Amino acid sequence: MKKILALILIFIWSEQGLSQTYYSENGKVTFYSKVPLHNFEGNSESLVGLINVEESIVDFYLDLETLKTGNGKRDKDMRLTLDTETYPFAEFYGTLTSDFDMESATEQEAVVSGSFSIHGISKDVEISGTLLPTNEGVLLKANWILSMDDYDIDPPKLLIMKVDDEQEIKIEILLTPYSEDSK
């Protein structure tokens, strides 16, 4: 399913033009979670993303089944909480609203504005991060706070201890030039 979605997105993006388009299927996502007296994190290295610099299009998605916390029971509970059978993906689609100079060799502040969707709910968000042109492409880093309540996600609890509603999300992805030859 993930490969089919990636191919569909690539086809749509290729119809929009390939100049200054950067793509990757192996970005890293980390979320940080808290319960009283305990913190944990979950990770995935399956973030799929695209930035079309010329059109200012930004599109990222993650198969939520790829998130792992290092604890099988906690992973199972997380999938039940997120209802990944019904809502398997988290996605951001929007525009780069800040200026970005591919010719600069320095890390640049970046702001995107668009729709973030998870658990069947979409919300307009603005996320800040950085973009760094490299010899390989563009390195993107961003982090933000996600409120589970905003997406009708009921934080799991054990007895009287409940997972914090606010989850810190961090992404890092090296996007490389996309061309017809890379299909």
Image: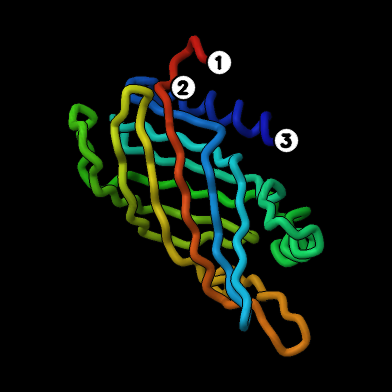
88 to the left or right of 101: right
Q: Disc 2 marks which amino acid?
A: Ser
Relative height, residue 40 to residue 37 (above, below): above
Amino acid identity at mark 1: Lys
Q: Is residue 114 above or below residue 178?
A: below
Q: How many angstroms separate mark 3 from mark 1 (CA)?
A: 17 Å
Q: Secondary structure at mark 3?
A: loop
Dot 2: within a 10 Å radius of its alpha carbon, few (fewer than 14), some, or many (20 or more) residues? some
Image disc number at residue 57: none
Question: Could you tell which of marks 1 and 2 lies nearer the N-terminus?
Answer: 2
> Nearest the camera: 31 or 24?
31
Residue farthest bottom in this picture:
160
Residue placed at 49% from the left, 56% from the top? 116
The quarter of the picture where residue 134 lies is top left
Q: How is the image coloured?
A: rainbow
Q: Is residue 169 left or right of residue 158?
A: left
Q: Nearer the viewer, residue 29 or 20?
A: 29
Question: What residue is rendered at 53% in x and 68% in y?
Answer: 167
Q: Which residue is mark 3?
A: 1
- State the residue position of label 1: 183
Tell me if label 1 and label 2 are in contact, CB under 8 Å: yes
**Quick one: quadrant of the N terminus?**
top right
Residue 13 x, y percent position in the rendering? 46, 28
The residue that mark 2 highlights is 14
Marks 1/2: CA–CA distance: 10 Å
- How far is disc 3 from disc 2 in space, using C-alphas? 20 Å
